[in-house]
Amino acid sequence: MRKLAALLIIFSVLLFTHCGESPKQKAEPVEIADATDASGDADEDLQSPLKIALGKKLFFDPILSRDSSVSCASCHIPAYAFSDTSALSTGVGGLKTERNSPSLVNIALHPYFMREGGNPSLEVQVFVPLEGENEMHLPMGMAIDRLKQDESYTKLFKEAFGKEPNAFGITRSLAAYERTILGGSTRYDQFLDGDAQALTALERHGYELFTSDELNCSKCHEGGMLSNFAFENNGTKSKYEDRGRARLTLQTEDEGKFKTPSLRNVALTAPYMFDGSFKTLGEVVDHYAAGGQGHPNQSELLNGFELEQEDRRALIAFMESLTEEQLYLP
Ligand code: HEC
Ligand code: HEC
């Protein structure tokens, strides 16, 4: 499966670099092998402070978008747990993304990336927004040329990687920074550590509902990460235009299946679902209470349920307790 995902990405990288070149700026061939080689130099510290600092600068710098209007942080806004506040985000030229931008907090703990899981590493993931037409639309070769023309970047790449700007350094430094966007400071974490009082009585009641066999939430949103990272159809639609996991596997049984999102910081990441079609946590709860839209692949764990007003409030309060009080950031 991972091989398939990698092939797909490399294929799309090739595709984008070909159709994305403007006649004036001739891009150098993309160093795909270099950029996707996970091993690197065995002695190299890929999480060195210099690499992290460089990745952070790149993350917030619109230099990586075709018209220098959009940075990674435009769609992954720190104040919203590194997600976006609109259903679909805006890339270069005002174009909209196909999906809702997910939170990057604790992203290092995900086993694979993108909502259909089509991406094996944070390094390879960089190509998706960088080259995507409706995101940053800058072929890797052009990105390298641009950074080479910038004295401060040339210096920073030399210091961090001992080389001029290249695909290896761009992908490694961004991934190094992303790996530092870690939390672990929610009151729910304290609760799991044995401090029952870390949650209010209302939130604890919400937790009981969340983990109950009637609601089944924790069967998919499980453990500390509040995700099993499996591909599930939670009945958001009766018919999916976005095929979800089937985009990758082309299997009917995967239609409408998406990576179960972590609910950490969910109070900050509205709107919800792959297309941002639910505006509030209340709307999400009502969706599950109604038992979903009944797509043929919908999980059998969604049976619908009835909640008193107070229970509904408790369930929402529990989800609102999942906000990081502080992030570990360089
Ligand atoms: C124009 C908006 C936009 C920009 C710019 C953007 N992203 Fe994203 N990002 C998204 C969207 C939308 C998704 C969801 C993609 C999907 O699941 O198909 C996403 C997904 C991701 C993921 C996978 C998250 C997961 O849960 O699997 C990572 C990692 C990521 N972006 C990192 C970056 C980095 C690094 C940059 C800058 C190089 C960047 N993004 C720039 C919108 C954006
Ligand atoms: C069968 C597995 C499953 C069960 C059971 C389940 N969920 Fe989900 N949940 C998902 C998936 C998959 C998504 C993402 C769907 C999408 O992207 O459209 C999701 C999305 C969400 C979101 C939106 C998160 C975001 O960032 O967009 C919330 C909130 C949520 N679920 C809460 C709950 C609650 C509360 C319950 C119990 C009443 C529950 N879930 C039960 C699988 C499940």
Image (cartoon, rainbow, N blue to C red):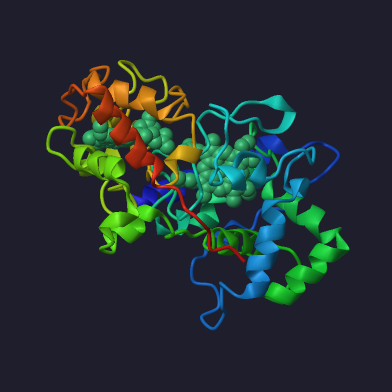
Q: Residue furthest bottom?
A: 43
**Quadrant of the drawing holding the C terminus:** bottom right
| Residue 320 image point, x, y percent | 40, 40
Which residue lies at the image location 74% right of the left edge and 56% below the top edge? 144
Q: Quadrant of residue 187?
A: bottom left
Indicate left or right for 65 with 244 as reference.
right
Which residue lies at the image location 71% right of the left edge and 26% below the top edge? 94
Ligand 2 falls in quadrant: top left
* Above/below status of 50 relative to 82: below
| Residue 215 image point, x, y percent | 18, 33
| Residue 12 image point, x, y percent | 54, 41
Indicate left or right for 139 with 33 as reference.
right
Of 61 and 288, nearer the camera is 288
Of 128 and 78, nearer the camera is 78
Q: Quadrant of residue 258?
A: top left
Report if residue 143 is visible in the image.
Answer: yes
* Above/below status of 25 relative to 188: above
Report if residue 132 is visible in the image.
Answer: no
Q: Residue furthest left?
A: 213
Indicate left or right for 54 with 127 as reference.
right
Of 142 and 111, nearer the camera is 111
Which residue lies at the image location 22% right of the left edge and 26% below the top edge? 298
Of 293 and 135, nearer the camera is 293
| Residue 1 image point, x, y percent | 32, 49
Q: How many marks?
A: 0
